[in-house]
Amino acid sequence: MLKRLLLPALCTLLMSLPVLAQPASIQRVNPTHWWTGMKNPNLQLMIYGPNAGSLTYTLSYPGVRLAKTHTVENPNYAFLDLVISPSAKPGTLRFTGKRGSQTLTQTFELKARDNSPKGQGVSAADFIYLAMPDRFANGDESNDKFADMADPNADRNNPFYRHGGDLAGAGERLNYLKDLGVTAIWFTPVLENNQPLTNEGGNMRSAYHGYGFTDHYAVDRRMGGNAAYKEFVRKAHAAGIKVVQDAVYNHCGINHWFLKDMPMKSWLHQWPTYTNTSYKYQPITDPHGAESDRRVTLDGWFVPFLPDLNQSNPFVSNFLIQHAIWSVEEFGVDAWRVDTYMYNDQPFMNRCNAALLEQYPAIHIFGESWVNNVVDQAYYTRNKIDFPFKSNQPGALDFVVYQAMLDALKTNFSWDDGVNKFYQALAQDAVYADPNKLVTFLDNHDTDRYLSVIGEDFDKYKIGMTWLLTTRGIPSMYYGTEILMKNFKNPSDAEVRRDFPGGFPGDKENKFEAAGRTDRENDAHLFVRKLATYRRDNPVMHTGKLMQFLPQDGTYVYFRYDGKKTVMVATNTSDKEISLDTARFAERMSGYTSARNVLTDATVSDLKLIKLPAKTAVVLELR
């Protein structure tokens, strides 16, 4: 696969000299446009077209200076360094390119920045809803498939093909999300994935997941294109819902336009023969680790059809960083989830994070580093450990607490097992600069569904959802968890990425509506809604401190508190009712004589002994 990808690009480079006799032209400019008034005055344009690198470029525009032109191995590329002064006005720049008797002109627009919300960030005050747009809702059947794309298929009967969900459909469900208590939506990527079908495990699969970009500056037509994304963000903001964009810096799709005629050999991490990443994270932080192991982890390809970008190449680095800033400014997104964070060049990630935070100080960035311990997880976010490398990432996806919550529900209580798993994970929060910036979850698009993992036990379902929505951090929920969608990844990922019932024309059931849900599904939906709206409306649940007490006999108690309110969360994970003696919690309960049960609205008049039914979590607002 590696040789098949690189040979065309190398041939282009080797054949470039005779091609120079052909006239030059410009086919692409990235970024497609920019803005005045940005904090960083520097901008690097990537110019592409036959012999575009053989032209001598000049520019005359008040307040904008062409500082340098870079030529690279491939004569079809030029990289132009611009300096945009604070005095520059919006308008159309005109570059002149000359070579011999040939002169051509290329325009580039500098826009005025608008005052629409952007880069607002997400915090512990938010509740994030993760959805795969292709599987969530279809609002425009006309864009389900296109014959001129590498994958022209759309078939809901095939779990591995695209199903037609899009941004228009998601926009029609914003009221549903708002009513549920959701304050932010995170989509798997919506950028163009003009990828061919791939053979995985004997099945031909489409790139409906979105993680193989083929054009960074185009939202996929099957999602509705750039205009649809802008409209979705506008509608989401109007509904009080923020938007999280899924960033992929580590790799791109094998069909990306710039891989068909690469700027230079070092654009990708290349090996003598195809080399896959080991997926092992230990060599990155291991003080005794071999450099060769570290290089395979970082520079090996994620899979053969997702080539690994070389972020130590300054042109690649600039391209990716500028696209991140462009996306926030162009679409108005509020936060970044970064795919495969630990496989990226970490100094590059620090530069990218710093550039985003310089322009949008409130933006939140949380990456995916799938590790199983707090030390390795802390490495990829701001931390208090004396690592040789210091990450500046504000947040991270909390895989440690994710696994701890599941283990707490799957194993019997003992010295180290059961609910002790959850307690012990939080007891190690001292390693993080701010654990409240970590994003917690019970499942996502790459894991088994939460309900199936806990044996479809509804009591356990409610316990885990209670923890998710009352503990520290930024809670995130995978679409359909609120209506008890289930399944395991085995035999395929498609089993945990099924369509949301009611999101597609012709669906027999509409679970966006209470009438379309079973009684149990409505119970789950109302349970999530009750806790999510309570969390949203009560600052103590997101800015209040957390105090937890050692678990005993299968019970686990913690408090969220501030100067105005104290909330007690008490869990009984055993199979029998327990009368909880609260004397040992006097440190937090002193002075309180009664409470309101947040989930039932019932009054608890005696706090000395609290009855906890088997497999139950209660949330009590102390009075």
Image: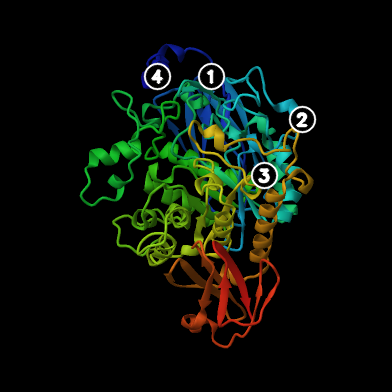
The disc at residue 24 is: 1
Disc 1 crowd, CA 10 A, few/some/many (<14, 14-19, 20+): many
In three-dimensional space, the C-alpha distance between marks 3 and 1, rounded to whole angstroms, equals: 28 Å
Residue at point 62%, 19% (across, down): 152
- Percent across and percent down for residue 385 are 33, 62
First in sequence: mark 4 vs mark 1: 4
First in sequence: mark 2 vs mark 1: 1
The disc at residue 13 is: 4
Q: Amino acid at mark 2?
A: Gly
The disc at residue 111 is: 3
Question: Contact, CB < 8 Å: mark 4 with mark 1?
Answer: no
Query: Which image quadrant: the N terminus?
Result: top left
Q: Which residue is mark 2?
A: 506
Disc 2 crowd, CA 10 A, few/some/many (<14, 14-19, 20+): few
- Percent across and percent down for residue 504 are 73, 33
Residue at point 41%, 26% (across, down): 304
Residue 597 versus residue 60: which sits nearer the camera?
597
First in sequence: mark 3 vs mark 1: 1
Residue 162 versus residue 567: which sits nearer the camera?
567
Q: Nearer the viewer, mark 3 or mark 1?
A: 3
Q: Amino acid at mark 3?
A: Lys
Element type at marker 4? helix
Point out the residue furthest to the right here. 515
- Percent across and percent down for residue 582 are 51, 80
